[in-house]
Image (cartoon, grey):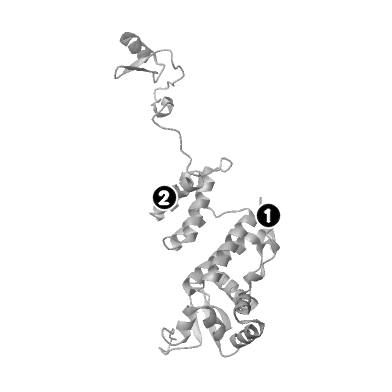
Amino acid sequence: MAHYLGTPSRSHLWWTSAHNAYGLDEAKKLHKRLLSGPTVDIYVGPERKHWSLHRNLLCHHSSYFETEFQGHEVPKGSNGKAEENKLELPDDDPRGFELLVKWLYQGQLEDCADLTEEKKYDYAVACHKLYMLCDKFDMIRLKNLAMDQYRRGLNEAELVPDADEINEIYRLSPANSPFRRLMTKIAARQIMDPEVDKDAETYRGCFEDNTDFAVDMVNAIRYMSGGMLFDDPTHRDECSYHDHSDGNSCQVKGKAKAMVNGKGTSPSSTSPDLLLRTALIV
């Protein structure tokens, strides 16, 4: 059941860190400086959604932007000349970038608990897009916050990604990514939940498209089961491993003994032929 997690703490405010490090007066000066100077035009996604942002603010929070706008790897325009105040991000998602801008200028992300039920899952999806941007921009603090907000959004919405979404998120995440661990744990829990009508077949596409998914899922099941040891498959429960294609089932046990290496064992079937062979042996 989803639960209320409260309003964002002040630890979500990036300028709180500056306040703690420099004192209130210095933090105010820093904030004023970051919101001054030239702006840069950033175009995100295939539809080129546009933002005009302060260059000092971007460079303060990300070495990626610092490198881009210091002239080392500045993207070039159509005329082949470097454009120091323009950046194209055609492969990134505007939903995630919008959250990044909100964090830069407001110092925090909104709490999904304040959203309607319909918007909580959409907010979680946007937080995943934000996470991918932060991974690219080397913004670790915000990346961790995006992960927290993604998980909280799912929890509040009481929804998890379906198999196709898990497949895409896993495929787009690098090896050893926390999002890969999260996706395999979500899938493993769905498979193990007796109240959910899902099994491994549900995630066949994940297995086929991602060679590591099966290994990660098995490890997730082992981890989440607490190392619980399953029943020994070589002991008892003989009927589970018998061929019943002839229509007979293993309903009678202990009424006759078959000889296996000189030892008595329960017959695997109650068919007349088997009972006759057993009687002849005994």
Q: How many marks overall?
A: 2
**What is the three-letter code of the residue carrying label 2?**
Ala
Q: Residues within 10 Å of mark 1 (few under 14, many from 20)?
A: few
Tell me if residue 146 can be seen: yes
The vertical placement of 153 against 45, above or below, is above
Q: Could you tell me residue 15's position as x and y percent? A: 62, 78
| Disc 2 packing (10 Å; few <14; some 14–19; many ≥20) | some
Mark 2 to mark 1: distance in Å? 32 Å
Quarter-of-image position of residue 150: bottom right
The residue where tag 1 is placed is 3
Between 199 and 130, the one nearer to me in the picture: 130
Quadrant of the snapshot with the C terminus: top left
User: Judging from the image, what secondary structure is the residue with disc 1 in?
Assistant: loop
Mark 2 touching mark 1, by CB under 8 A?
no
Q: Quadrant of residue 149?
A: bottom right
Looking at the picture, how far across and down is residue 25, in whole percent?
Answer: 66, 85
- Badge 2 element: helix
Q: Measuring 68% from the left and 58% from the top, which residue is drawn there?
A: 117
Q: Name, please, the residue furthest toward the left.
A: 261
- Residue in front for this viewpoint, 64 or 79: 64
Please tell me the numbered disc located at residue 214.
2
Depth order, front residue of 153/20: 20
Residue 192: percent from left, percent from top: 52, 43
Tell me what residue is drawn at x 45 percent, y 63 percent: 172
Q: Is residue 77 left or right of residue 103?
A: left
Indicate which disc, 2 or 1, sits on the residue closer to the N terminus.
1
Q: Nearer the viewer, residue 234 or 15?
A: 15
Mark identifier at residue 179? none
Whether residue 166 is visible to the viewer of this picture, yes or no, is: no
Give the vertical position of 25 relative to 192 (above or below). Answer: below
